[in-house]
């Protein structure tokens, strides 16, 4: 999925910009990672919605969001774990001093980012699907009401 790759590159670029501005150690700025992921997931799901009928959209939309999340998060977690392990071990040491877990290494960083990213991605996907499902249902109801039909497939 191209969208997942674009999200991963955007997250990596954002991290490198923060690193260049000497802000990478500010863990609070990870909030913007969620916004980047949310934008990509929503774009992917809406694009799929425009291609499918309502009846087949929900499960495929959920799968679309989870797949986009997985691709983006795996690539980004791999990038960060390699970067911290081989290119900036001093930042890894600084992160160790700010966390309770002092045994951080590339694998631990990868697993942590993967779990956090997939949890965020799943929540964003589910929320987006609930919103888009209700928008689609309301549109159908309005159409059927306008055309005086009573059959609505939910």
Image: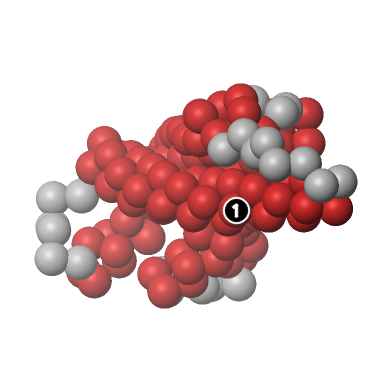
Look at 20% across and 50% down and name the residue there. 104
Identify the image quadrant of residue 74: top left
Where 100 falls versus 15 (above or below)? below
Q: Counting other residues with Cα less than 10 Å from the Cα at mark 1, is it few (<14), some (14-19), or many (20 or more)?
A: few
Q: Is residue 82 left or right of residue 153?
A: left
Q: Is residue 32 left or right of residue 73?
A: right
Q: Quadrant of the C terminus?
A: top right
- 85 vs 24, nearest the viewer: 24
Where 76 falls versus 139 (above or below)? above
Q: Is residue 23 left or right of residue 89?
A: right
Q: Is residue 124 left or right of residue 106?
A: right
Where 133 falls versus 34 (above or below)? above
Outermost residue, right direction?
A: 147
How many callouts does the rendering have?
1
Look at 60% across and 53% down and name the residue there. 134
SS type, badge 1: helix
Q: Position of residue 46 (x, y in %)?
A: 71, 43
Q: Position of residue 89 (x, y in %)?
A: 35, 51
Look at 86% across and 46% down and name the residue there. 147
Q: Position of residue 88 (x, y in %)?
A: 42, 52
Look at 20% across and 67% down and name the residue there. 99
Identify the image quadrant of residue 106: top left
Q: From where the camera sits, is residue 39 visible?
A: yes
- 103 vs 54, nearest the viewer: 54
Q: Quadrant of the N terminus?
A: top right
């Amino acid at each position: 999925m191209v969208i997942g790759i674009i999200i991963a590159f955007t997250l990596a670029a954002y991290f490198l910009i923060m690193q260049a501005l000497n802000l990478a150690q500010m863990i609070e700025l990870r909030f913007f990672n969620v916004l980047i992921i949310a934008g990509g997931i929503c774009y992917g799901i809406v694009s799929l919605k425009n291609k499918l009928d309502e009846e087949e959209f929900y499960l495929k939309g959920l799968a679309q969001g989870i797949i986009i999340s997985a691709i983006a998060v795996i690539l980004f977690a791999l990038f960060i774990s390699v970067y911290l392990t081989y290119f900036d071990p001093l930042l890894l040491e600084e992160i160790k001093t700010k966390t309770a877990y002092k045994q951080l290494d590339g694998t631990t960083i990868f697993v942590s980012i993967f779990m956090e990213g997939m949890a965020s991605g799943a929540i964003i996907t589910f929320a987006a699907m609930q919103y888009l499902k209700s928008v689609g249902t309301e549109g159908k109801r309005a159409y059927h009401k306008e055309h005086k039909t009573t059959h609505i497939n939910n």
